[in-house]
Structures are given as C-alpha cells and as structure tokens.
C-alpha cells in the first residue's frame, strides 16, 4: 500500500532527471518484488496472531498489511509498465501508470479505514469481544515495525534515485505503518494491564487504538490521493509555472510569453512554451533564442521534454525599414537599397520610400508587378502616411553564370587602370584582388579595398560609391561592380 507522508506537508516534487537504462528498471523491479515477499510474511503472521488474540487492533493491521500486499503487487506491475519506452500508441511513454497505481493504493487505504471504523464502533457500542494479548502478539507487531522500517528505507532510496512516484508512495506508507503499529502495541499494553490489574474498562483501548490507526491511514490516504490526482490531471508543481515565466521572459530576444504549460507523467516533465520574437529576426537567430529558452527551463526541470513555439511580433520601437523588411519576409522576397527621403516639415507627410525588390526570374512583368503592388499595400498598412513608394524590380540571383575571359592584353590594361583610379582616391589605401569577367557579353568587376578601419560604415559606402561611379565613367561597358571593403 502507498500513502503520502505523515508529516504536515508532503515532500517537494523531485525535478531532477531520473537515471535511465536496464539497470534502473531492474533495481526498481527488485525492490518492489522484495516488498511483496515481506508483505506476504507480515500479513500471514498478523492474521494468525490477530485471530488467536481476538484483537481488533491486530486484525486491522492484518487487513492493512493484506492491502499492503495488493498495493505492492500493483506497484510491481506499474514500475514494469512505466519503464517501457514510448511507442506509436503511447507517444508520451507509460509513466502515467505510476500515478494511477498510487491513486489506486490511496483508494485501498480509504477502504481499510472504513472497515476498521465500522468494526471498532460495533465493538464499542454493540458487542463485547474478549481480547487475549500474548507475547506473540507483541513480538509479531515489533517484527512488523522492523520490517516496515527496513523496506520503507529501501523503497525511498530507490524512489528518490529514479524519481518513482509509485515506489515513493509505498515507502511513505510503510513509514506510517511503523507509527500505526506503535498505536496497536500501546492499545494491547492497556488491555493487558486491565486484565492483570482488574480494570476491565481498558478493553476499549483496543478498538480505540484501531480507530487511531484508521485516522492515521485516512490522513495519509487523502494527501496521497491529492498528489496522485494532481499528477493524473496534469497539475503543475506549485510555483513552477511562475518561475518558468520569469525565466523565459528574461531571455534576450524574447519579446513576451503568452503561455507556459507544464505536465508530468511519472518521473518525466513535459513543458510547452509560447514565446514572441522580433518578426524580422532570421531563422538562425530565432533558433538560438529558442535554445536559450530551453536551457533556462531545463535548469529548473532537468531532463524535461521541452517544446518551444515561436510567434513573430513587431517590437514597440520598430522603425520604417524593419516594417518594410517584415512585409518582404512575409512574401518570401528580398529587399535592399532601402532609403527614405523626407521632403516635408518632418511630420511624415512628405516621406518618400524607395527600395529594390528581388523577384524570381521566372515571373512575367505583370506577375512581378502584382506582387510588388501587394507589397506596397501592406507597407502602407504598416506605415500609414507615406507620401509615395517607388519600387525597383530586379531578378533574384538564383543560378550560376558562365564567365568568359577577356583578351589578356585588354584585361591587364583595364585592371591596371581601375587600380590607378581606385588608389587615386585619398581614403583608399590600396586596391587588390581585382578581377574582370565577361558574363553574357557584360563586364563584371570585383575587387577589395583597404581603408581606415575607424571610418563609419556610412562613410565607407559613400567612398566605394564614388569610386564605382569613376569606374563607370572611364569604362561605360561595365555592367556591375562589387567592392569589398576591409580595414587596413
């Protein structure tokens, strides 16, 4: 039989990850099996002595022990089933069996209480039963206390090691059996004293002791039933949900958390959390935020099965360019060269937005224009008050071009001239890795510049744009220029 603790408050839930593997399962089955063997022995001895002495206290303990035997068998079965891995029909595993086992044991304990109280009231009010305490009664009860103390310690050690609620319930119940056995022994001592010192009224001590046992068992049963019912109904550990909320919201990059749910089956916890992240964040960044949230949760519930659901959200300080990027990401297109020009009085009425949109080269102009129209409508909805939106449509690079080489003489002359133009600019330290390629009769130029590493990025862009313009003036046939800037 299992029960909650006899102390005023039940123990805090164990949130440490239980060890796994064949050794864990075999150790749990071994300690549950030994508990069954001891329950058989103790129950047989109590029944024999109880019938011989007519002691309701001992008979109540015998019934208590017989229910212990039933409960031990249920525990043995439950730990065998709960250790089975998850399968297609039980995708969260089988560990809820331990919660169900402990709940059934609580019901058996309550049934014991009902019978003990019924029999005790009958003996106190309606019929007299002669109690004949013997030395064997005291020896059996003392032996029972030793056995209960030993198996309580053995069960609790394994229960805490593997976070098994069924084994813990058995252990806590057997520890309470020690106290109930003491009550029965005290009642028998009073009956024995009454017989030897001429106080027959002390015969009532035996049914009163039995009722005291039932009171202990009833309190244990109610607390155990509540704990196991909480497990069956997926109740979260007290205060854990609030702690996880605080941990999740403290993670950098999390804008908010609307839901954190916790449930547990046997020794395993399952956590489902919803978080909001910046809608313009890249997938890799969102994954990093989710991993950080999961790590915070596992810090409180090691070994838990954690699922993080992310939702995009606009931050309170999101600017115009972030809004445009969010709309573009919604339609799976890339935008670049974003710029905004304010020709008004600074109140936004004269704000003009310009951007480049990359679309698939398989689209027709009509299809691309319809897509851009939808983008512009959503941009205006996100940023009302824009005076105008001017969008440049271009193809997204989605294939590898074949580059043809120019004649060596012309390529060498053009390379030297481009280096001279670049290095004539006062801010450019040197121009290197310059290459010239011919793609579909169009000239592509790429090169690397060394510049002062302390220059602002905006100034670097201005310098490279000026050099690019000089390249094009000197060689109008250039189609594209790519300049990579490096700190000198």
Image (cartoon, rainbow, N blue to C red):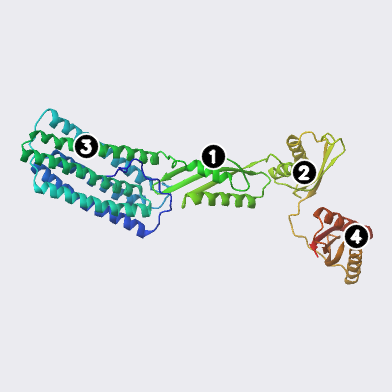
Q: Which mark is residue 471?
A: 4
Q: Circle 1 is placed at which residue position?
A: 259
Q: Residue at the spot x=85%, y=36% of the render?
A: 350
- Residue depth check, mark 3 versus mark 4: number of the one nearer the observer: 3
Q: Quadrant of the C terminus?
A: bottom right
Q: Residue at the spot x=9%, y=38% of the render?
A: 194
CB atoms of marks 4 and 1 within 8 Å: no
User: Which secondary structure lies at badge 4?
Assistant: helix
Q: Quadrant of residue 27?
A: bottom left
Q: Residue at the spot x=72%, y=47% of the render?
A: 333
- Residue depth check, mark 2 versus mark 3: number of the one nearer the observer: 3
- Residue depth check, mark 4 versus mark 2: number of the one nearer the observer: 4
Is 209 or 292 nearer to us in this picture?
Answer: 209
Q: Circle 3 is placed at which residue position?
A: 212
Counting residues from the start of the chain, the first of labels 4 and 2 encountered is 2
- From the viewer's perspective, tell me whether residue 244 is left or right of residue 373: left
Residue 91 visible in image: no
């Amino acid at each position: 039989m299992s029960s909650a603790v006899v102390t005023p408050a039940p123990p805090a839930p164990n949130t440490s990850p239980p060890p796994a593997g064949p050794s864990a399962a075999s150790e749990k089955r071994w300690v549950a099996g030994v508990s069954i063997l001891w329950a058989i022995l103790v129950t047989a001895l109590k029944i024999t002595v109880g019938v011989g002495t007519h002691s309701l206290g001992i008979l109540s303990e015998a019934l208590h022990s017989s229910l212990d035997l039933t409960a031990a068998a249920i525990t043995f079965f439950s730990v065998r089933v709960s250790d089975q891995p998850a399968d297609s029909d039980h995708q969260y595993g089988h560990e809820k069996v331990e919660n169900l086992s402990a709940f059934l044991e609580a019901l058996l304990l309550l049934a014991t209480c009902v019978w003990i109280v019924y029999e005790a009231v009958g003996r106190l009010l309606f019929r007299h039963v002669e109690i004949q305490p013997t030395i064997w009664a005291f020896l059996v009860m003392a032996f029972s206390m030793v056995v209960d103390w030993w198996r309580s310690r053995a069960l609790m050690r394994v229960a805490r090691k593997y976070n098994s609620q069924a084994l813990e319930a058995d252990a806590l119940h057997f520890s309470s059996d020690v106290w109930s056995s003491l009550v029965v022994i005290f009642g028998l001592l009073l009956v024995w004293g009454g017989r030897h010192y001429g106080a027959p009224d002390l015969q009532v001590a035996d049914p009163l002791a039995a009722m005291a046992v039932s009171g202990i068992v009833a309190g244990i049963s109610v607390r155990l039933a509540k704990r196991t019912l909480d497990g069956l109904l997926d109740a979260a550990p007290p205060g854990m949900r609030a702690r996880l909320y605080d941990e999740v919201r403290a993670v950098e990059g999390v804008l908010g958390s609307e839901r954190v749910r916790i449930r547990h089956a046997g020794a395993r916890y399952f956590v489902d959390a919803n978080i909001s992240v910046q809608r313009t964040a890249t997938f890799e960044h969102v994954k990093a935020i989710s991993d950080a949230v999961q790590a915070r949760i596992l810090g409180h519930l090691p070994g838990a099965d954690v699922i993080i659901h992310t939702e995009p959200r606009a931050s309170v300080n999101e600017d115009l360019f972030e809004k445009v990027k969010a709309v573009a990401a919604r339609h799976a297109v890339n935008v670049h060269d974003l710029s905004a020009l304010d020709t008004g009085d600074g109140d936004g009425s004269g704000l003009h937005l310009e951007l480049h949109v990359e679309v698939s080269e398989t689209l027709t102009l009509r299809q691309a224009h319809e897509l851009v129209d939808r983008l512009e409508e959503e941009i205006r909805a996100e940023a009302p008050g824009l005076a105008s939106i001017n969008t440049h449509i271009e193809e997204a690079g989605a294939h590898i071009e074949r580059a043809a080489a120019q004649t060596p003489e012309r390529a060498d002359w053009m390379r030297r001239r481009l280096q001279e133009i670049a290095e004539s600019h006062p801010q450019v330290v040197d121009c290197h890795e310059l290459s010239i390629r011919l793609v579909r009769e169009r000239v592509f130029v790429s090169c690397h510049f060394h510049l002062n590493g302390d220059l602002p990025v905006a100034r670097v862009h201005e310098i490279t744009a000026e050099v690019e313009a000089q390249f094009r003036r000197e060689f109008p046939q250039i189609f594209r220029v790519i300049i990579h800037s490096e700190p000198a």
